[in-house]
Image (cartoon, rainbow, N blue to C red):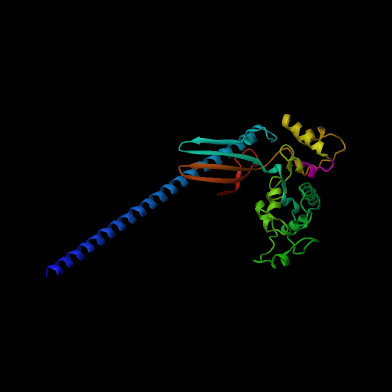
Amino acid sequence: MTALHRAQQGAALVMALLVVALATTLSGMMLWRQDVWLRQVEMQRDLAQTRLIAGAAIQWARAILAYDARTSSFDHAGEPWAVKVPPSRVEGGEIGGEMSDEQGKWNLNNLISADGTANTKEQEVFRRLLRLLDLPSVLVPALTDWLDTNSEAMPDGAEDAYYLSLSPPYRTANRALTDIDGLLRVRGFTADAVERLRAHVTALPGYHSVNVNTASALVLAALIPELSVTDVQQLIALRKSIPFRDLSDFRTRLPRPDIAVDATQLDTRSRFFSVQLRASYGRAAITTEAMFERQGVDWPAIVWQKFE
C-alpha cells in the first residue's frame, strides 16, 4: 500500500507539473499574441500618420504650383517648385522630396494624332531620340501599333496576332499610355530600354509640347535636328543664367537664324508636373508619387497618385 501511495503521489506531482507547464505556455502565447497585436496596431497608426504627412506635402506642392502660375508667365528650373527638399523633420516624423516638369520630357502619346492614327512628324522625333540613346528604331512602329486605334500592324510593328501568341497572351492596348512602365508590355521594350528612356520621356494624356527651359539635351537634339551637340550645350548654358521667356526669345538666341522651330512642338510653359515624396513616422515609411495638371491659376488637379 505504501508503494502504491507513493506512485499515486508521483503521478499527481507529474500531472501538476504538466498543468503548470501548459498554463505557462498558454499564458506566454497569449502575451506574445497580445504583443504582436499591439505592434500591428502601432504600425497601422504610424502608417496612417505617415500617409497624412505625405498628403499634406502633396497639398503643399499643389500650392507652390498655383502660386507659380500667378507670379510667372513661363516655367524654368530656377523656380521654387524645382527646388529639391532634403529630408526634413516634422512632428514625430520626416518628409522630403522633389518635383519635376513632365513637359521637360517628350510625350510618348504624341505618336498618335487626335483621330487615333500615327503622327509621322512625332515618329521622326522618337526615332531620333532612340538613335541618340543607342536603342533600335523598330521600337517606333511597335509603340505606334500599341497606341493607335486600328488593328493593322505596321512594318516591324505588332498587333493582336503577336501579343496573343505570347504566354500569357494579351491584346494590344489601342489607347494612350498612362505610365512609362506600360512600355514593358510593348514588343521590343526591355527593362533596360525603359530605364534608358525614363529620364527623357513621359506619358501625358493627349498631345503636349516640350518646355525648352527644362528639356534634357537629348530631347532638344531630337526635336531640333539642326542643332549640333555644341549648340545644345550652349542653349542649356544660356537658359541656366537667363531662362527663355517665350518661343520668340528662344528663336533669337539660337546659334543660327536658319534653324527651324516648330511652335506646336516647343513651349516655355508647362501644364504637367510630377512629385515624388518620401515620408516616415515612427516605424512606418512610404514613398508616394503623383502627377498634377495645372490649368490657369487654380490649384492643379491630381491626375494620379500612388503609394509604395
Front one among 89 and 193: 193
Up/down of 193 relative to 244, above or below: below
Is residue 116 at least partly visible in the picture? no
Q: Is residue 20 left or right of residue 251?
A: left
Q: Residue furthest left?
A: 1
Up/down of 296 relative to 165, above or below: above
Residue 180 at x, y percent in the picture: 67, 51
* Residue at (79, 45) in percent of width and height: 222
Up/down of 69 relative to 223, above or below: above
Residue 21 at x, y percent in the picture: 28, 59
Range of magenta residues = 220-226
Q: Is residue 215 left or right of residue 37?
A: right
Residue 275 at x, y percent in the picture: 61, 42
Residue 262 at x, y percent in the picture: 81, 43
Front one among 229 and 276: 229
**Picture quadrant of residue 16:** bottom left
- 163 in magenta: no
* Residue at (63, 34) in percent of width and height: 68
Q: Is the N terminus in the top left, top right, bottom left or bottom right quadrant?
A: bottom left
- 225 in magenta: yes
Q: Residue furthest top?
A: 241
